Amino acid sequence: MLPERNLALELVRVTEAAAMAASRWMGRGDKEGADGAAVDAMRAMLRSVPMDGIVVIGEGEKDEAPMLFNGELIGDGTEPKTDIAVDPIDGTTLTALGRGNALAVIAVAPRDTMFDPGPCVYMEKIAVGPSARGAISLDKSIAENLSAVAEAKNTSVHDLTVVILDRDRHERHINEVREAGARIRLIPDGDVAGAISTAWPDAGADVLIGIGGTPEGVITAAALKCMGGEQQGRLWPRNERERQQAIDDGYDLDRILTEDDLVQSDDCFFAATGITDGELLRGVQFSSDGCHTESLVMRSRSRTVRQVVAIHQLEKLSELGSDD
C-alpha cells in the first residue's frame, strides 16, 4: 500500500535532476554522453526517495544505452515497496541534436503491479485523452478509430491531429490516416510526450498511433491513468526469434493490453521534466538567476495533475552531471 503522501512530489526532484544533467549535452551530438549524465543524476537522486523500489522497466536495454537496469534496487529502503518504470531521457536523439520534445520521466506503482513485457521491446499502440476514452480499439481499422474519436470529441475527422513516430514501419499507418483525411504530426522520437499530449489541453494532439517501445508504453500508461486518458497496446515481436521466445514465456501476442493491464493499480505516480522545448513542456533554460525547469507531476488516485515551474541555483548543479 502506498502512503497518503503524494510520492510524485518527491519524484519530480528526480526528473528535474536528470533533465538538468541531460540539458548540458543538448545539441552536442553525443547520445551516450547525454544518456549517461541523465542516468547518473537520476540514480543519485533516487537514493534519497523514501521507498523500497525495484526497477521493472529500465530504459536502455533495446539500444544498449547506459541504464537503470531491471532489478536494480532504488530508494532509501524504507516502505512503501514499489515498482519503478524509468526513462532518464525519452528522446536521446532529440537531445543530442538539440530538437524539441525530449523529457526525463519516471513512473512508480505498488510492488508487482507493473507489466513485464518479457522479450518484446516493442508494441502496437493507440492513445487518446479523456474526451475520447472508450472510443478506441486496436481491433478497429485506423479509419474506424478516427471516426469514433471524432464523434466522441464532437468534431470532424479532418480536424483531428494524429501523432505518429516517423519510422519506415509506419508507412501504412500514415497512408491510412491521410486517406481518412486527418492531420498528422510526425515526431522523430519521444512517444511518451506524444501520447501524453493527447490528454494535455492546448498540446494540439488527439490520437497517438503506431509501434513504439514497451518501456515507454508502461510509463505512458501510468501517466494516462492519472490524466483519465486511455491507451491500448499489443506486443509486437521484431523477428521470429523474439516471437517464439514470447510464446515460450507464455505471452499472448493477440491480447490487447489496456492501461490497467500495464499498470495494475489505481494509485500510481508519474513525473516528467522537459529537457528540450516541446508542445508539452518547456525545456531546461539557463539564465543569470539560475536554471529553470518545467515539469508535470501526477497521481492517479486523486487525478491530480500539477505543472511545476522551478528555479535552481547554478552553483548547486555541479553534482548533477555537468562535465565542466
Image (cartoon, rainbow, N blue to C red):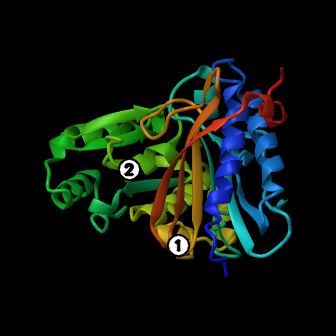
Q: Which mark is residue 4?
A: none
Residue behind mark 1? 261
Q: Amino acid at mark 2?
A: Trp
Q: Amino acid at mark 1?
A: Asp
| Quadrant occupied by the C terminus | top right
* Residue 59 in the image, given as x and y percentages of width and height: 70, 48
Of 30 and 276, the residue lying toward us: 276
Residue neighbourhood size for the residue with mark 1, other residues' Cα within 10 Å, grouped as few (<14), some (14–19), many (≥20): some
Looking at the rendered image, the disc whose residue lies closer to the viewer, 1 or 2, is: 2
Q: Secondary structure at mark 1?
A: helix
Of 321 and 250, the residue lying toward us: 321
Judged from this view, the residue extending furthest toward the bottom is: 1
176 above or below 262? above
28 above or below 110? above
Report the side of 300 relative to 34 (left or right).
left
Report the side of 163 relative to 176 (left or right).
right
Residue behind mark 2? 200
Q: CA distance from mark 1 to mark 2?
A: 22 Å
Q: Give the number of callouts.
A: 2
> Can residue 257 be seen here?
yes
Point 51% across, 61% down: residue: 221
* Residue 112 in the image, given as x and y percentages of width and height: 69, 76
Residue 309 occupies which quadrant of the picture?
top right
* Residue 50 in the image, given as x and y percentages of width and height: 78, 66
